[in-house]
Each structure stands twice: as C-alpha cells, then as structure tokens.
Amino acid sequence: MLSGIRIVEVEGIGPGPFAGMMLADMGAEVIKVHRPDGAQSPGAADQAIVDRGKRSIVLDLKSESDREIFLKLVASADGLIEGFRAGVMERLRLGPEDCHAVNPGLVYGRMTGWGQDGPLAQVAGHDLNYISLAGALWHASLPGQPPVTTPTLVGDIGGGAMYLVVGMLAGLLNARSSGTGTVVDAAIYDGAANMMNLLMSLASHGQFVPERGKSLLDGPHWSRSYRTKDDKFMSVQALEPKFYQLLLAKLGLSEDPDFARQFDKDLWPYLTSQMESIFASRTREEWEVLFAGSDACVAPVLTPQEAQHHAMNKARKTWVEREGVLQAAPAPRFSGQEEWSPPAAPLRGADTEAILAELSKG
C-alpha cells in the first residue's frame, strides 16, 4: 500500500520503532538510523521484531560528516520519525527547520510522551506516567485496588505509535497534494486522553463515573474475567441484554430473579461473587467447550503462545514464527494482499555500505 514511500527512522525505543514497523508492514521503505554504540535502553536489542522489513545504517549524529549523510537521507525521504525529548534534534541541528531546508515536502514525525511544549516537555516519563496523568489509567483496577501497570498497550502503542502512524499518513497525503511537508507532534499523553472519548461519551449520560466499579463496563458481573478450576481465566462481557440472556442460559441462571436484574448496580458485587464461584467449578477447557460458537460473549484468556495454537489463529494466521520467534502479523489487512510471512529484522548497520553507495549515486 505504501510502495515508493521512504521513511527515515532515528533509533529510539517503544512507540517510534513500532510506528516504523507498521509503515514497513504496509510497504514503505524504512531506513533505520542506528547509533554506533549499540542498544542503550532496557528492552532494546541489536535485532528486534519491531525492525522487521527495515534497512539499517549506523550513523553518529554528533559527527559532522555523519550529520551530512543523514541530511542526504532526509533529502531522499518522504517522512522521518524521531523519538527524542523535545529540543534534542534541534541541538543536533537536525530539527524540522534543518530538515525542511533540504526537503520542504518532508513529513517530520515526532514521538514523545509529553509533547513538544508544555510544563512537562523536558521531564522524563514512561507509559504508565503518561496515561495516569491523561486520565486513562484511573479505571484500570477493581474497586478498592490500585490501578495495575498496563502492558504498554494503552500508552506507548495505542496513544503513541498508532497516533503517530495516523499523523504520518495524513501528512504524507497532504504533502502529495500540496508539496508541503509538516511536523507531526504525537504525544502519548494526548493520544491516551483522546482514546478516552468513547468512554467519555458514556459519561455524558451517566454510564461512566469516577468511582470504580460503578460504570457500565468496569463494575458489572457480566464485564470482567473469572478464575477457573485449573487457575486459568475466562473473560465475560455480555453487554447487550440479548447476549446476557444467552450467558444466563448457558450458566443455568435464566430463572434466577437476581441475575435477571442485569443493570442493578446494587446487585453487581453479590452477583460477581456468585459468578466467581460458578466459573471456579470448571476448568477453562470445559468452559471453552460450553461456550464454543455461542453469542454469550465469553472467551478464554490466552497467552500469546496459546493464541498461536487456537483455531482462530489457524484460520487467520495472526500469530506466526520466524526462526523460533513468535510475532503478530500486520494489521489491518487489505483486499488483494499476498499471504504474509515475517521479513527479517536487520542487524545493526547491515545496510550501511549499500545505503551509502546509493546516496553517492544520487
């Protein structure tokens, strides 16, 4: 879909590389500019899934000669992704003004936690900090418990990488029609807050409130996960009454007068305790068999490794392996798309000589 688009990605961690992976998955040529001193942060590596399908060049952006090479890359690119704290690229003389001077149509993507301005722009932070201050972490707990540490999906990926990709695509479309580039200020703080708007629409008519356990989706007995007899879990979210009735039928509760009061908040704690006992009476596999093919909105809670072997994955091939490394296939999918297999992630600097030769010809 993005064939012919070139993106220069400056090495970083978390959402920036993930956004670069998504663009590479969609067919863009992504050239990753690696540091010469290797991976510096926990979780970073010289070869990673998020670099699949990219090319790698090693440059020292503090070196004047390598800075000139970087600007040659920028001159040939459609977009750029960087994830430094606000002002770092400017100090390297590689900020938007410097890059637009050699390529006015460049879409300059900036990925930060707090954004390019504001009182926290120069303050360090991570996923959990951004989503907590944005209001997106508040309901990530059961009543009376502190919010759990979410697995970076809400902040780094949802509020960060996804919004950067959307911004990059919008900028690329605009540049194609106008010839003018832009700067995309993608802040995880902003994106995480923006994702709350669906819940805030519930709040506008009283179905999403600050008190945990009292809202439409975080309090009911029909919207949570339950431990099974074998210490595994089943998820339940039978929101619509017609699906809730199917849930009750499967559990043998159709005639129970208390369970019939689906939206009675006063009953939710009691009915939750009843459901806990019910789900603890059978193994996850037994519950899977009972609910298979049902519209009761019940599903097993699987690890990625278990998901790989589920019938759903056999049909859609969402989880795949390359050289023993499990990873998820690109999303979304497009009509007419060829069957996908994981491309290799480059070793640090693997394409340096080839990219330099191409630039010298240009």
Image: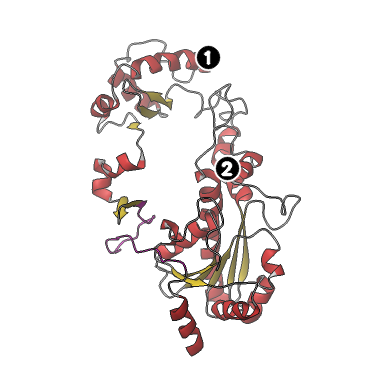
Q: Residue furthest right?
A: 119
Quarter of image, res 296: top left
Across and down, in percent, residue 174 comes to: 56, 70
Q: Which residues are magenta?
A: 327-348
Q: Amino acid at mark 1?
A: Asp
> Which residue does the image show at 56% across and 54% down from the upper left?
41
Going from N to C along the chain, the mark reached first, 2 or 1, is: 2
Across and down, in percent, residue 194 comes to: 59, 47
Asked if residue 232 lies left or right of residue 7, the reply is left
114 is within the stretch colored magenta: no
> Which residue does the image show at 28% across and 46% down from the upper left?
313
- Please give the residue where the numbered disc 2 appears in the rendered image: 197
- Please give the residue where the numbered disc 1 appears in the rendered image: 266
Circle 2 — which element? helix
Q: Which mark is residue 159?
A: none
Front-most of residues 275 and 323: 323
Figure colour scheme: secondary structure
In the picture, the quarter occupied by the N terminus is bottom left
Circle 1 — which element? helix
- By secondary structure, the bulk of the magenta-drawn segment is best described as loop
Asked if residue 273 lies left or right of residue 42, the reply is left
Across and down, in percent, residue 136 comes to: 59, 39
**Considering only vertical position in the picture, is 6 above or below 293?**
below
> Which residue does the image show at 45% across and 63% down from the upper left?
23
Q: Residue furthest bottom?
A: 361
Q: Amino acid at mark 2?
A: Asn
